[in-house]
Image: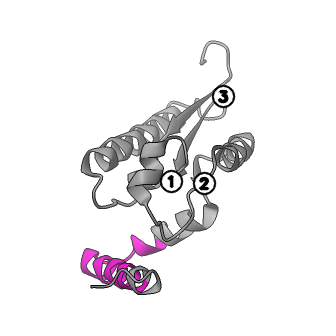
Amino acid sequence: MIKRKRGHIVGISSMSGMYAFPWGVVYSATKHAVSGFMASLTEQLRMQGFSKIVRTTCVNPYYVTTCKDVIDFLQKPRFAPLTVDEAAREIVKGIVRQDIVVTVPRLFGVFTRFMLLFPVPVQQLVRDYLIREYELNNNLHK
């Protein structure tokens, strides 16, 4: 890519790569690794003066209905999972815009970054509140 003086590297991470989700320790760890790799690669290309010819984009989608396992795991998610077409459309738009990070849906990325400004105990209180609200709204509270 450097010799050709053009290229674009896209890494597929996940919202789990930005903000750890419970019951997915291994999955979250691998997605954090992808996000870290892409951030490091982006910075290395920038420091070497190649960031204008080799672009990078790290994609962080919410759950995508790629297979039945995802649907079974989610059961009744708080937010509807994305279809493959919805996710693909937003990802391609972000790549065309040359975004370094693409979060699908975009609002989730804003919320996640906002939450990371707070200490972990505050983040946990918000998670607990959201879980309780979800359980109450779906008659799952015990």
Q: Position of residue 128 (x, y in %)?
A: 31, 81
Q: Quadrant of residue 26?
A: top left
**Can residue 18 be seen in the rendering of this structure?**
no
Quadrant location, the C terminus: bottom left
Q: Residue at x 42, y 52 (%)?
A: 72
**Residue 104 vertical position relative to residue 140 in the rendered view, above or below:** above
Q: Nearer the viewer, mark 3 or mark 1?
A: 1
Q: Is residue 82 visible?
A: yes
Decide: marks 2, 1 in contact (CB < 8 A)? yes
Dominant SS in magenta = helix
Residue matched to label 2: 82
Count of numbered tags: 3
Q: Nearer the viewer, mark 2 or mark 3?
A: 2
| Magenta highlight range | 114-133
* Nearest to the observer: residue 15 or residue 36: 15
Answer with mark 3 or mark 1, whichever residue precedes in sequence. 3
Marks 1 and 3: in contact by CB < 8 Å? Answer: no
Report which residue position mark 1 lands on: 63
| Kind of residue indicated by mark 2 | Leu
Give the residue at mark 3: 53
| Dot 3 crowding, Cα within 10 Å, few <14, some 14–19, many 20+ | some
